[in-house]
C-alpha cells in the first residue's frame, strides 16, 4: 500500500476498520510488498477462498483486522477525529476525515500521497488519490489547519438533553416542504458571519439574515433565495 494515509466515508468506525482490513487482504492476494511476512502467514489459510467466499468468512474478517491494525493505526487513525466526535455526516464524512488529517498531520503532509474512498449507498463507489504540497500562504497546509481551528470548534460545541434534540427534529420534520412560516430569530448559538433562515413565504421564497456580532434579528437585512 504505497500511500501514507487512507481516508474513508465514516458511517460507523467498525465499517472503516473492516474496509481497511479488506484492502490489506486484497494486497495480500496480489502479493504486494507492503504486506509483511507475519501478515502473510496469518492470511495464508484464506488464500484459496473465492471472492464470494472471502466476503462471507468471519474468520478472514477477524484475521485481516488483526494483521492490519498496525497499518490502520498509522494510516487511518489520524483521519478519524472529527467523524468520531461528530458522527455520521454521509457525504461530508469523507471530507471531515480529510480535515482531521490536516489537523493532526499538517506539518508532515508535504509530498505525501493519500487515498480517498467514497461510496454512494452501496450502489457506486469512487477511489482517488491526492498528492499534497505545502503551498504558499494563505493556502499552505499549515495555515489551512490553523484557520479551520478544529480543536477549538469541537470544544465550543453546546450540549443539549436528548429531549431537546427530539423536539428540534420534530420541528424540522414539520417544516420540511412547508411554506408561509417564520423561524425563531434566536441565533445566539451561531457563529458570527453565519447566514440563517428567517422566513419562507407563501411562494416558497426563502429569506436569510447574516449574524454579525450579537444576534438582534435581521442585522444585515434579508437575503432572498427563490
Image (tube, helix red, strand yellow):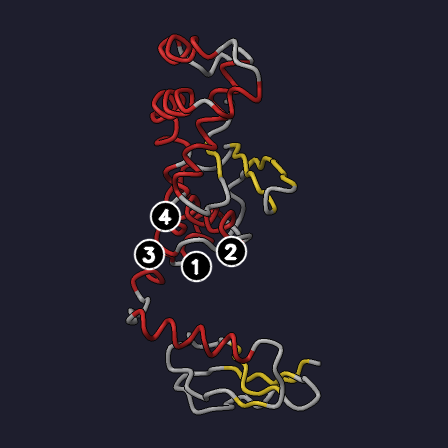
Of callouts 4 and 2, the N-terminal one:
4
Is 70 left, or right, of 198 in this rendering?
left
Of callouts 2 and 1, the N-terminal one:
2
Q: Residue at x 42, y 52 (%)?
A: 145
Q: Which mark is residue 81?
A: 4
Query: Looking at the image, do the residues carrying marks 2 and 1 touch, with CB atoms under 8 Å apart?
Result: yes
Whole-number angstrom distance, CA of label 1 to CA of label 3: 11 Å
**How many numbered markers are drawn?**
4
Q: Closer to us: mark 2 or mark 3?
A: 3
Q: Which residue is mark 2?
A: 138
Of callouts 4 and 1, the N-terminal one:
4
Whole-number angstrom distance, CA of label 4 to CA of label 1: 17 Å
Q: Which residue is mark 3?
A: 151
Is 151 left, or right, of 109 in this rendering?
left
Q: Which residue is mark 1?
A: 147
Residue 212 position, x and y percent, is 46, 83
Q: Is residue 90 above or below residue 25?
A: below
- Label 3 crowd (10 A; few <14 / some 14-19 / many >=20): few
Amino acid at each position: 500500500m504505497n500511500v501514507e494515509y487512507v481516508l474513508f466515508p465514516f458511517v460507523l468506525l467498525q465499517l472503516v476498520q473492516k474496509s481497511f482490513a479488506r484492502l490489506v487482504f486484497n494486497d495480500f492476494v496480489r502479493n504486494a510488498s507492503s504486506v509483511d511476512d507475519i501478515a502473510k502467514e496469518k492470511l495464508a489459510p484464506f488464500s484459496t477462498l473465492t471472492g464470494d467466499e472471502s466476503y462471507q468468512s468471519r474468520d478472514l474478517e477477524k484475521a485481516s483486522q488483526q494483521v492490519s491494525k498496525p497499518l490502520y493505526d498509522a494510516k487511518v487513525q489520524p483521519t478519524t477525529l472529527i467523524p468520531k466526535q461528530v458522527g455520521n455526516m454521509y457525504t461530508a464524512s469523507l471530507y471531515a476525515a480529510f480535515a482531521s488529517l490536516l489537523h493532526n498531520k499538517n506539518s508532515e503532509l508535504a509530498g505525501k500521497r493519500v487515498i480517498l474512498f467514497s461510496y454512494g449507498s452501496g450502489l457506486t463507489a469512487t477511489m482517488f488519490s491526492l498528492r499534497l504540497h505545502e503551498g504558499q500562504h494563505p493556502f499552505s497546509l499549515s495555515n489551512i489547519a490553523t484557520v479551520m481551528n478544529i480543536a477549538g470548534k469541537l470544544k465550543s460545541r453546546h450540549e443539549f438533553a436528548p429531549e431537546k434534540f427530539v423536539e428540534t427534529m420534530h420541528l424540522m420534520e414539520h417544516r420540511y416542504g412547508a411554506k408561509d412560516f417564520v423561524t425563531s430569530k434566536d441565533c445566539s448559538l451561531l457563529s458570527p458571519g453565519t447566514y440563517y433562515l428567517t422566513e419562507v413565504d407563501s411562494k416558497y421564497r426563502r429569506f436569510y439574515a447574516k449574524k454579525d456580532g450579537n444576534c438582534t434579528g435581521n442585522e444585515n437585512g434579508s437575503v432572498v433565495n427563490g
